[in-house]
Image (spheres, rainbow, N blue to C red):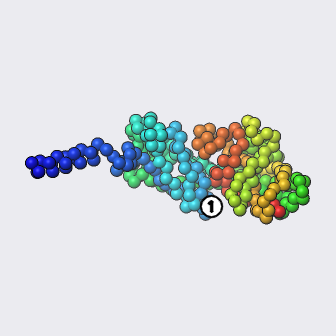
């Protein structure tokens, strides 16, 4: 009798293990839910901020300082349709001023197919992605220090020079003109905070203004009103609001956190290799 009882307990334990996965459906050993890889960016030692986006499924991640990324498919609980999803998809590798690149991946029944398309048997890109620069950007401000007295506002002028790496490149200057920027982002180098300065109402829908840029360069200007601030002795730099005109899906921008037709500080998350004057607000 005792021996039968032991057999029964063992059978019950095995049955429980076979029916219940304590780690959840997406953590079963062997599940192919992740793709990894590395992105190298021409002339950039720490290529953090390249946005890696999986089309149609609409998930994305940013590369780290080494250019490495790990993109996971959404869990079934968050995306119930993922379980039976099959087909060919593309990974996009997106920055502001480097050439857009893609890699092809296959998904079957909600899992990546390792060893097929551009993914090796270990779930890693077969080769590193190499992004070449499309245009260069340098921004200068009119002063090295901005001093506030009382409530008097100070105007500083931002002068941005853009030139193509080779040939001619067309850029998008939302709400801009041939020689004026429509907006800039202001980055606080001490806190990392991003502020937006835009012509007109920054909440309104922007219009696209395309400017062809050659290797000779184009100068774009923006006059920024710096209001009196409580913080003192903090350093700032500017990021000109320039978008590439490559075939970037609107869903990619939205997955980063902003609408492509509206100004947003989320723009500053994307890798944008440019040089800019550092100035101090006293």
The image quadrant that residue 39 belongs to is bottom right
Percent x, y of residue 198 = 78, 45
Label 1 crowd bin: few (<14), some (14–19), many (20+), radius 10 Å? few
Percent x, y of residue 12 = 22, 45
Viewer-proximal residue among 138 and 206: 206
Q: Is residue 68 visible?
A: yes
Q: Residue at x 37, y 49 (%)?
A: 23
Percent x, y of residue 219 = 81, 51
Viewer-proximal residue among 57 and 76: 76
Circle 1: element type: loop
Q: Residue at x 71, y 62 (%)?
A: 190
Q: Residue at x 75, y 36 (%)?
A: 204
Q: Residue at x 47, y 40 (%)?
A: 78
Residue that label 1 marks: 44
Q: Residue furthest front?
A: 1
Q: Is residue 178 left or right of residue 72?
A: right
Percent x, y of residue 220 = 80, 49
């Amino acid at each position: 009798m005792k021996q039968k009882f032991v057999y029964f307990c063992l059978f019950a334990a095995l049955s429980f293990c076979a029916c219940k996965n304590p780690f959840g459906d997406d953590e079963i050993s062997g599940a192919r839910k992740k793709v990894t890889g590395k992105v190298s960016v021409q002339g950039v030692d720490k290529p953090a901020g390249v946005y890696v986006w999986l089309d149609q499924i609409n998930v994305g991640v940013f590369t780290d300082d080494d250019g490495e990324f790990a993109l996971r498919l959404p869990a079934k609980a968050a995306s119930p349709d993922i379980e039976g999803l099959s087909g060919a998809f593309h990974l996009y590798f997106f920055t502001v001023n480097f050439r857009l690149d893609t890699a092809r991946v296959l998904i079957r029944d909600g899992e990546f197919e390792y060893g097929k398309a551009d993914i090796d048997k270990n779930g890693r890109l077969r080769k590193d992605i190499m992004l070449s620069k499309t245009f260069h950007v340098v921004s200068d401000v009119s002063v090295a220090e901005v001093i506030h007295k009382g409530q008097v506002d100070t105007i500083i002028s931002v002068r941005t020079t853009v030139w193509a790496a080779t040939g001619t490149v067309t850029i998008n200057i939302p709400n801009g003109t041939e020689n004026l920027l429509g907006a800039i982002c202001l980055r606080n180098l001490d806190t990392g905070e991003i502020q937006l300065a835009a012509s007109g109402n920054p909440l309104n829908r922007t219009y696209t203004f395309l400017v062809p840029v050659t290797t000779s360069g184009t100068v774009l200007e923006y006059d920024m009103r710096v209001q009196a601030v409580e913080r003192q002795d903090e350093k700032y730099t500017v990021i000109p609001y320039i978008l590439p005109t490559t075939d970037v899906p609107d869903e990619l921008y939205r997955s980063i956190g902003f609408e492509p037709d509206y100004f947003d500080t989320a723009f500053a998350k994307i890798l944008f290799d440019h040089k800019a004057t550092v100035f101090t607000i006293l």
